[in-house]
Amino acid sequence: MRRSDREIKDFDEIIEVINKCDVCRLAINDGDYPYIVPMNFGLNMEDGKVVLYFHCASEGKKLELLRKNNKVAFEMDCGHQLILDKAQGNCAMEYEKMSCTMAYESVMGCGQIQFVEDEDKFAALKIIMKQYHSEDFEFGTKVIPVTTVFKMVVEEMTGKRRKNNTKRNNKKQD
């Protein structure tokens, strides 16, 4: 990681970032170019490993690609905040006079997809609902047979954070 000062090294802090996110982007192998798809997801810890659960319709490009190659990368981010800051003092170079950047938290990594068996789909869908603080929502079970549920056992992941350290109000400045 180029900016090691922004790396989140503590495992529990990485999990906190995941818990704040509401979209996980999967990068799936599609030959010359990756196929990236945003997905709703759920987080579960199983045997000390991070497992991400996903659901979708029972057909489509994403499933075709996953059945060919189940190795994927993922990325999720949250806490976006625009940071506009005028530098103090005399700057030698023009680009240093105004700073425009973004505060964020992100997690990315990789793993392998495994399809969830029919008898385990209900529990997996409850894990997904928990991510959105709706674990007690009684969703219709009639759609479960026509829903594909899969999970990714995360093999490696990293977290990164850029905090807003400015003391100014970061609204658009005149």
Image (cartoon, rainbow, N blue to C red):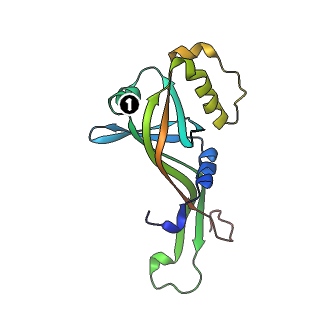
Query: Where, quadrant-wise, is the N terminus in this rendering?
Result: bottom left
Q: Residue furthest front?
A: 47
Query: Where, quadrant-wise, is the C terminus in this rendering?
Result: bottom right
**Amino acid type of the residue that numbered disc 1 sits on in the rendered structure:** Leu
Instruction: Name which residue lies at 43% across and 41% down.
Output: 111
Relative image position of residue 122 (x, y in whole percent)? 60, 22
Instruction: Name which residue lies at 66% across and 21% down.
Output: 139
Relative image position of residue 72 (x, y in whole percent)? 40, 40
Q: Is residue 147 left or right of residue 17?
A: left
Instruction: Name which residue lies at 59% across and 71% down.
Output: 85
Q: Residue furthest top?
A: 142
Which SS class for mark 1? helix
Where 54 falls versus 107 (above or below)?
A: above
> Is 136 or 96 nearer to us in this picture?
136
The quarter of the picture where residue 112 lies is: top left
Where 67 falls versus 17 (above or below)?
A: above
Where 54 falls versus 111 (above or below)?
A: above
Badge 1 density bin: few <14, some 14–19, many ≥20, Cα 10 Å:
some
Q: Residue furthest left?
A: 32
Where 147 falls versus 37 (above or below)?
A: above
Q: Residue furthest right?
A: 136
Relative image position of residue 83 (x, y in whole percent)? 59, 64
The quarter of the picture where residue 37 lies is: top left
Residue under pointer 1 = 66
Relative image position of residue 64 (x, y in whole percent)? 36, 26
> Is 114 or 26 nearer to us in this picture?
114
Instruction: Name which residue lies at 69% across and 66% down.
Output: 169
- Count numbered badges in the picture: 1
